[in-house]
Image (spheres, rainbow, N blue to C red):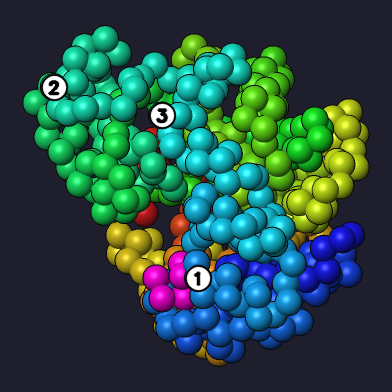
């Protein structure tokens, strides 16, 4: 590889995951860290580390200038952003490229186009990918009401620059719509720096299905099958599964083909995820957005395909063609991923930062734990509450569920409440066991 040193512009388990991939490829890795992460695992395992600021994300991991300065001072020739923080900020990707460094991700203009949800809808439609009936960017509340009259209630008001489930508000009437448009604009401006919003028809009980794609920028684009991400709380994913249970094979093929077509249409490079809503009544699916980065839930795809998606990211960023064709990728067995968050599911998921006084990780066949936390570590209050991802694989869904139950029973975290008890309850629920849950299921789940 022509890349020799990769600056990892992230923290926690994903930073450690990238550091490990670099080591296997013979690449030098450089970690960045805030005051709160001076003793963190990603810092200890990297070949070098650079302090970039205070504990708050805005003064460290979101400080693009500090991260770029770290890349220059450490001799890095590439930057891998992981997920979150600066990973989908087109201006940062452009600054990395302008500095003469390799950006491990799609070009800045692709991030820009796909990051604007309204623009992404237009790209998808141009590629022949079905989109949820909706509107263009709305000028005001009157325009929203007029658009809703054509689309039909209920609708969702969505921030055009939104992501991660934020900036979305439902409305079922003209009066409610006028109110939430104002609220959504205010929220969007605060969260994303843009108050642009648009409408989409709200599907009553859809499944959330996403397709993993990888592209090399030389015409090679493949999909790595799909994941079901329907178990969500407040539009934040909790448990993911690959492949999607009960999905019609014809729908699966059409959805995966649509994801590849969209990646080709936009000139994608690297690993990305095309997200769809599946109408469980009609069997129709609709594009909703594209995540232009590695996903939190990439381990389930790795478990069912045997691929190393982070290594593929690094290779195609280095200019290599994809080392495999679509027919080389097979989906074997079933994998589940449980997000372990420092939150109390019995107290409205209140964040629970603090010291992990004792920790026992599950193991055995088909069990993978991605984490950067050890006993004695302190979970800081400054960042996302996810502290680990437990992923399990089985030759079929029943075996994967059984393995998940066993691994969750072994998983012991003391000192702070976590979401592990929630996952144990979910795997005993008949709807989850049957695989018939949709995105509304967890909101009504008895904790």
In the picture, residue 268 is in which quadrant? Answer: top right
Above-or-below relation of 54 to 291 = below
Label 1 belongs to which residue? 65
SS for dot 2: helix
Which numbered disc, 3 or 1, marks the residue closer to the eye? Answer: 1
Q: Position of residue 88 (x, y in %)?
A: 52, 51
Q: Left or right of 417: which side holds 254?
A: right
Q: Which residues are magenta?
A: 58-63
The magenta stretch spans residue 59 = yes
Label 1: how many Cα within 10 Å (few below 14, some 14–19, many 20+)? some
CA gap between label 2 and label 1 equals 41 Å
Label 3 belongs to which residue? 118
Label 2 belongs to which residue? 142
Label 3: how many Cα within 10 Å (few below 14, some 14–19, many 20+)? many
Residue, x 47% and y 75% (percent of image)? 60
Contact (CB < 8 A) between labels 3 and 2?
A: no
């Amino acid at each position: 590889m022509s890349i020799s040193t990769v600056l990892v512009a992230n923290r926690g388990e994903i930073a450690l995951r990238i550091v490990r991939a670099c080591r296997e490829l013979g690449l030098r890795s450089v970690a960045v860290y805030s005051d709160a992460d001076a003793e963190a695992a990603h810092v200890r395992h990297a070949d070098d580390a650079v302090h970039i600021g205070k504990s708050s994300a805005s003064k460290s991991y979101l400080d693009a200038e500090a991260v770029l300065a770290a890349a220059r001072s450490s001799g890095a020739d590439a930057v891998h952003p992981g997920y979150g923080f600066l990973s989908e900020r087109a201006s940062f990707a452009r600054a990395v490229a302008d500095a003469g460094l390799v950006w491990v991700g799609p070009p800045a203009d692709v991030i820009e186009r796909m990051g604007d949800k309204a623009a992404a809808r237009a790209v998808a439609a141009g590629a022949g990918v079905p989109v949820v009936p909706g509107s263009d960017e709305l000028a005001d509340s009157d325009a929203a009401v007029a658009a809703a009259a054509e689309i039909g209630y209920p609708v969702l008001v969505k921030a055009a620059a939104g992501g991660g489930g934020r900036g979305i508000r439902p409305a079922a009437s003209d009066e409610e719509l006028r109110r939430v448009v104002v609220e959504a604009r205010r929220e969007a401006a605060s969260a994303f720096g843009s108050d642009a919003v648009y409408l989409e028809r709200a599907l009553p009980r859809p499944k959330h299905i996403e397709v993993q794609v990888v592209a090399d920028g030389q015409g090679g684009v493949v999909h790595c099958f799909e994941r079901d991400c329907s178990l969500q709380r407040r539009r934040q994913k909790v448990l993911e599964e690959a492949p999607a249970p009960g999905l019609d094979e014809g729908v699966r093929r059409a959805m995966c083909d649509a994801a590849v077509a969209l990646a080709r249409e936009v000139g994608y490079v690297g690993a990305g995820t095309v997200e769809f809503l599946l109408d469980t009544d009609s069997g129709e699916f609709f594009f909703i957005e594209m995540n232009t980065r590695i996903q939190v839930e990439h381990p389930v795809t790795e478990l069912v395909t045997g691929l190393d998606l982070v290594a593929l990211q690094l290779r195609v960023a280095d200019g290599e063609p994809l080392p495999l064709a679509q027919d080389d990728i097979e989906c074997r067995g079933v994998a589940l991923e449980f997000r372990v968050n420092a939150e109390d599911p019995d107290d409205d998921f209140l964040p629970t930062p603090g010291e992990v006084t004792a920790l026992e990780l599950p193991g055995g066949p088909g069990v993978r734990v991605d984490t950067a936390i050890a006993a004695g570590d302190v979970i800081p209050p400054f960042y996302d509450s996810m502290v680990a991802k437990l992923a399990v694989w089985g030759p079929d869904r029943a075996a994967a569920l059984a393995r998940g139950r066993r691994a969750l029973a072994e998983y012991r975290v003391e000192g702070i409440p976590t979401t592990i008890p929630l996952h144990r309850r979910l795997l005993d629920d008949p709807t989850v066991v049957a695989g018939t849950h949709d995105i509304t299921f967890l909101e009504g789940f008895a904790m």
